[in-house]
Image: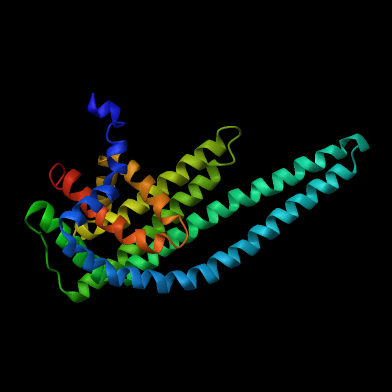
Amino acid sequence: MLQILTGFGFLSGMSYPFRLLRLFKSNPGLLSYIIVPIVVNIVVGIFLYIGLFFFGWQVTQLLTDNMINRLDLLLADLPSWFNSLDYLVIFLGWLIRIILSILLLILTGFVLVQFGVLLAAPWYGNLSEKIEKVRTNKVEIIEVGMIRDIGRAILFELKKIVLILGCGVLIFLLSFIPIIGAIISTVGGLTVTGTIICLDFFDGALERRRLKFRKKVSLVWKTFPASAGFALVCLLLIGIPFINLITIPFCVGSGTLFVCDRILLKHL
């Protein structure tokens, strides 16, 4: 019954950032490990929001204005009693702007995660180790040496890019299927995004065990739908402008909690 009420783990997966707050409350010393990542996020975030977001906003404005102009030209060839549709065009223009702006905010937050997690990796690693120690009373680390460690980190990022591009091309092609194409592309896009988010936030604990990339991806799917709930709440947290500068370290820490509770005991 509990599984049904929590969506077979979906709602439980969503609860992990809030579980981390409870862990911080009982272990306040852990808070010291998120100070540097927050500073790194603020520095990276300033450049991203000034560059990527405002550039993207200009592109959004250009696309919207172009679409409205096309609709205006179309209405100009229609009988005069169709002039009342101008209000509909204005409404559609604002609706498109809002949708594109939300997507742009999510994209900016997603890029911020990629850079922030990479640049603050040593501090996130310490945070993850301390959380795992508190949660399981032990920390498993397989040492491979600094050079190989750096190589694995680079390969991890490259494989994520390959996964995004490969799935992105397939989703783009499937989007042309009549009627169901839009549904497939939406679900597919959310699935890929959720998988990447889980890989980023689970990696602190998984990488210490030097797991292969395919194994990490399989663990994300083995914990579905809890991993989907976790990815959704993290996507919301990283999509809120400026607030995400603080919430990203919490997502990293809650990812370690998720691994300790749902992966280490059941799948490793």
Count of numbered circles on the image: 0
Q: Is residue 237 left or right of residue 125?
A: right
- Measuring 32% from the left and 57% from the top, which residue is drawn there? 200
Whether residue 79 appears in this view of the structure is no
Residue situated furthest left in the rendering = 137
Q: Quarter-wise, where is residue 190 in the image? A: top left
Q: In the rendering, at what x and y percent does residue 207 appear?
A: 21, 60
Image quarter where the N terminus lies is top left
Q: In this view, does 111 lie to the left or right of 207?
A: right
The image's colour scheme reads rainbow
Pick whichever, 196 or 244, lies toward us: 244
Q: In this view, does 209 lie to the left or right of 189?
A: left
Name above or below for residue 226 compared with residue 54: above
Q: In the rendering, at what x and y percent does residue 126 appear?
A: 19, 67
Q: In the rendering, at what x and y percent does residue 211 appear?
A: 20, 56
Name above or below for residue 37 compared with residue 163: below
Q: Is residue 160 left or right of residue 103?
A: left
Whether residue 168 appears in this view of the structure is yes
- Measuring 89% from the left and 45% from the top, which residue is drawn there? 76
- Measuring 41% from the left and 56% from the top, which residue is drawn there? 238
Residue situated furthest right in the rendering = 80
Q: Quarter-wise, where is residue 229 in the image? A: top left
Q: In the rendering, at what x and y percent does residue 213 appear?
A: 27, 55
